[in-house]
Structures are given as C-alpha cells and as structure tokens.
Amino acid sequence: MSTEELGYILKMPVPCPHCLQESEQTVAFLINNENFGCLECGGMVDLASEEWVAFRQKLSEALTALQPYFDPLPQ
Ligand SMILES: [Zn+2]
C-alpha cells in the first residue's frame, strides 16, 4: 500500500466555519487541497490559513511515519 493509498483510506471530520457541520475528508485530500466547498451550506472551507497549512504539513509527516506500520499487514 502506498502512502497515497493510505491517505485515501484515512478520513477525518472537518468542521465548516460557516454552518459548523462536519464533513469527512480523506487525509490525502486535506494535504493536497487549499479549500473545499461545504456540502451542507456551500460555503468555502479555507485550508490555506497559517494554522491549516501547519496542520496539513504535520498530517503529511504523520502519514509518512504511519506508512511502515501498514506495509507488513497481511492482505
Ligand atoms: Zn457549511
């Protein structure tokens, strides 16, 4: 399983700043995107803020660190 595949399996809830509804996004999506439209209210969820950029960087590192633990799992 590649890091990319792992990133598309792991999901996390992201609260919308406009309507506060959480939408589930894959870790890979959060790492690779600057924003997305909320499914509930259509508002833009900004992932390019300083906090989000730092968080996405940490997420990317965590994903890479997690990778070796998934590789030896029997299919
Ligand atoms: Zn919303």
Image: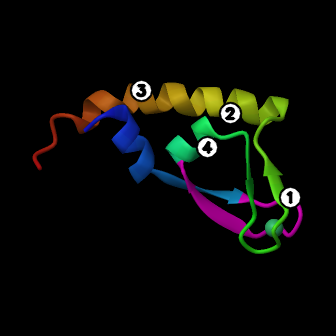
Which label's residue is closer to the chain start, 1 or 4? Answer: 1
Name the element at disc 3. helix
Q: Of the two numbered discs 3 and 2 on the same chain, state the one appearing first in sequence.
A: 2
Query: Which quadrant of the view contains residue 42?
Result: bottom right
Q: Quadrant of ligand 1?
A: bottom right
Label 1 CB-ligand 1 distance < 8 A: yes
Depicted 50 relative to depicted 24: above or below? above
- Left or right of residue 1: residue 65: right
- Name the residue carrying label 3: 64
Span shown in magenta: 15-26
In the displayed structure, would residue 14 be above or below residue 59?
below
Q: Which numbered mark, 1 or 4, is in the foreground of this view?
A: 4
Q: Amino acid at mark 3?
A: Thr
Q: Residues within 10 Å of mark 3 (few under 14, many from 20)?
A: some
**Residue 57 at x, y percent in the picture:** 62, 26
Q: Earlier in the sequence, mark 1 or mark 3?
A: 1
Dot 1: element? loop
Tell me if label 3 and label 4 are in contact, CB under 8 Å.
no
Measure the C-alpha gap from mark 3 to mark 4.
14 Å
**Identity of the amino acid at label 4?**
Leu
The image shows residue 8 at horizontal and vertical percentages of 43, 49
Q: Residue at x 27, y 28 (%)?
A: 68
Look at the numbered disc 2 and give the secondary structure of its residue: helix
Which residue is under mark 4?
30
Viewed as shown, does residue 6 lie left or right of 51? left
Q: State how far apart marks 3 and 2 are (Cα).
A: 14 Å
Q: Which residue is mark 2?
A: 55
